[in-house]
Amino acid sequence: MSKILIVEDDTTVRDTLALNLRAEGYEIATAADGEAGLGAARSGKPDLVVLDVMLPKLDGLTVCRILRRESTVPIILLTARGTETDKIIGLETGADDYIVKPFSLGEFLARARAALRRGQTNAALSKELISGNLRLDLQGRRAFLEQAELALTPREFDLLAALMRNQGVVLTRELLLASVWGDHYPGETRTVDVHVSWLRKKIETDAASPTRIATVRGVGYRFEG
């Protein structure tokens, strides 16, 4: 029996989802704030986390970011905000799916089942990211170039992981800042440029002529592989 954790501060939404998921045969755990949800995810080892974005004590994006660093558990974000930017930030934070309120129970149940299937199918594959001679061990938070381990800071690791997950896609500086440093980080986009520069010195053959992380002028960066 799959176990699903619902982290939602709206009692009606939380209870409705729990009732319908139990009727589908799932084991359900619930939490009403981000801190409790993070603790429940760590101790309960759920097969799926359903996570509201706007939560007291610790917001959903922060919880999602922390969980993604610690595990490969599938995460579905629930939010009342449905702009494209919000969705991209949610997915880049590490979520597997993003559902905008209000939603139908049929849609939610279908997405929950799909997330559980993906989690079961891709559990082994999602433990690492590989591009040529560059490998990221996501669970152990270790990076290797050929057989040599790279000394990456936590921010460098998360930045490289975000870029590698989206190989060939241009990611804006604003998006990288939000997904790696957090929505409320007071820094400027220059922070991203500095960390990319540090990364290039560690993973590029020639940092002055990078071939892995390409700069898209006026926009951001693209991981080429």
Image (cartoon, rainbow, N blue to C red):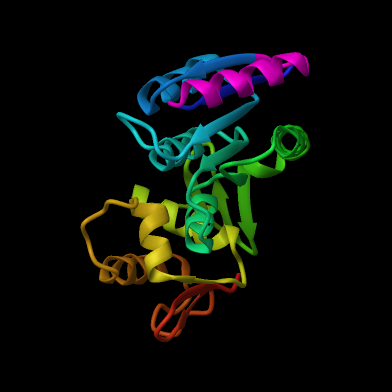
Question: For residue 138, which quarter of the picture?
Answer: top right
Placement of 39 over or under 192, stated as above or below: above
The residue lying toward the viewer, choosing from 155 and 147, is 155
* 181 falls in the magenta region: no
Placement of 225 over or under 78, stated as above or below: below
Give the dominant element type of the magenta stretch: helix, strand or loop. Answer: helix
Q: Position of residue 14 (x, y in %)?
A: 54, 23
The residue lying toward the viewer, choosing from 160 and 81, is 81
* Res 138 seen here: yes
Q: Position of residue 197 (x, y in %)?
A: 34, 72
Question: For residue 200, which quarter of the picture?
Answer: bottom left
* 11 falls in the magenta region: yes
Q: Position of residue 19 (x, y in %)?
A: 66, 16
Question: For residue 37, which quarter of the picture?
Answer: top left
Give the number of marks: 0
Placement of 81 over or under 189, stated as above or below: above
Q: Which residues are magenta?
A: 9-27
* Res 152 seen here: no
- Toward the left, the furthest residue is 186
Image quadrant holding the C terminus, namely bottom right
Residue drawn at (50%, 39%), measured in percent from left and top?
A: 68
Residue drawn at (59%, 63%), measured in percent from left and top?
A: 166
* Left or right: where 106 falls relative to 135: right
Residue drawn at (37%, 67%), measured in percent from left and top?
A: 174
Image quadrant holding the N terminus, namely top right
Placement of 48 over or under 102, stated as above or below: above
